[in-house]
């Protein structure tokens, strides 16, 4: 019964979206609407596209319908879902990461993060940049505990007078993201940083560019501290490109 009701609500929402975008109402244009949702959670993304490029994006929640302007001009590339128990009740909360890339260039784009809690019905929407890094090609897998998502920064922190390294040849900083009662945010998870320290040490030892090798050495100092539950350095915080664009509440 609940599943049927959910389908009816989603269908009604799509009809409302079509009313907002009259050009999408004809059957020939039906493929231009992409609906994203996570079963059991009250948020839905509807993407209106032209040749795959997003021309408008709407987020539906019990708080209403909001336009998500930053992802216009991008292409949907994928999504991942984490369902933590973040707020103290027995309901699954939501940490939803949706990936968007530049048309014709999957090496650049942005992440859209949506966090939802159940005890106090609330949602947050955040954007962060996506960039191709050495993590895209290195044959290793990081294991994160339940409820933790990973944000691979496009860059290393800017350490002192060293260049700020980034791009496909750089093993950039990885942030552990958790859903808190104030929304998704960087939370230190020591067991992940112990893995990152080992991987980075191997990459540092093989690095041939002296300045990047020194940047990796400073990165290792940060990872060692975080692996013991220590606080992130000022450089790590400054490198955390995290922009909250919506806070939503409902009853």
Image (cartoon, rainbow, N blue to C red):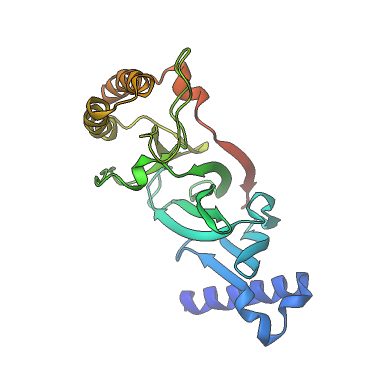
At 37% from the left and 48% from the top, the residue drawn is 84
Instruction: For residue 25, say whether it is visible.
Output: yes
Name above or below for residue 190 compared with residue 129: above
Horizontal placement of 83 versus 140: left or right? right
Count of residue discs = 0
Please state which of residues 199 and 177 is positioned toward the viewer in this rendering: 199
Instruction: For residue 113, say whether it is visible.
Output: no
Picture coordinates of residue 35, whole percent (x, y):
56, 69
Please state which of residues 96 and 6 is positioned toward the viewer in this rendering: 96
Give the residue at the far front of this rendering: 208
Picture coordinates of residue 156, whole percent (x, y):
43, 28
At 30% from the left and 22% from the top, the residue drawn is 220
Please state which of residues 210 and 83 is positioned toward the viewer in this rendering: 210
Toward which corner of the image does residue 176 lie, by quadrant? top left
Name above or below for residue 187 compared with residue 226: below
At 46% from the left and 13% from the top, the residue drawn is 160
Please state which of residues 164 and 33 is positioned toward the viewer in this rendering: 164
Toward which corner of the image does residue 166 lie, by quadrant? top left
Give the residue at the far top of this rendering: 161
Horizontal placement of 123 versus 232: left or right? right
Horizontal placement of 143 versus 235: left or right? left
Picture coordinates of residue 188, whole percent (x, y):
36, 29
Name above or below for residue 120 compared with residue 76: above
Picture coordinates of residue 135, whole percent (x, y):
35, 42
Horizontal placement of 229 versus 25: left or right? left
At 51% from the left and 65% from the top, the residue drawn is 37
């Amino acid at each position: 019964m609940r599943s049927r009701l959910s389908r009816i609500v989603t269908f009604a929402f799509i009809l409302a979206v079509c009313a907002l975008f009259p050009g999408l109402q004809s059957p020939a244009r039906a493929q231009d609407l992409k609906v994203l949702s996570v079963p059991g959670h009250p948020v839905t993304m509807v993407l209106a596209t032209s040749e795959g490029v997003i021309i408008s994006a709407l987020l539906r929640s019990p708080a209403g319908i909001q336009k998500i302007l930053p992802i216009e001009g991008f292409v949907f590339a994928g999504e991942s879902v984490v369902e933590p128990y973040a707020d103290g009740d027995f309901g699954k909360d939501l940490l939803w990461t949706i990936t968007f890339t530049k048309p014709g260039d999957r090496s650049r784009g942005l992440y859209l993060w949506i966090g939802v809690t159940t005890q106090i019905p609330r949602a947050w929407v955040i954007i962060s940049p996506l960039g191709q890094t050495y993590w895209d090609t290195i044959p290793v897998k990081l294991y994160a505990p339940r409820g933790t998502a990973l944000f691979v920064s496009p860059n290393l922190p800017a350490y002192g007078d060293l260049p700020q390294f980034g791009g496909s040849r750089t093993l950039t900083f990885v942030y552990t993201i958790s859903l808190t009662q104030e929304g998704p945010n960087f939370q230190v998870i020591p067991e992940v940083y112990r893995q990152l320290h080992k991987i980075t040490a191997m990459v540092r030892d093989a690095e041939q560019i002296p300045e990047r090798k020194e940047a990796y050495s400073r990165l290792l100092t940060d990872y060692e501290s975080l692996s013991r539950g220590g606080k992130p350095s000022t450089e790590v915080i400054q490198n955390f490109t995290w922009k909250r664009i919506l806070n939503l509440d409902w009853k």
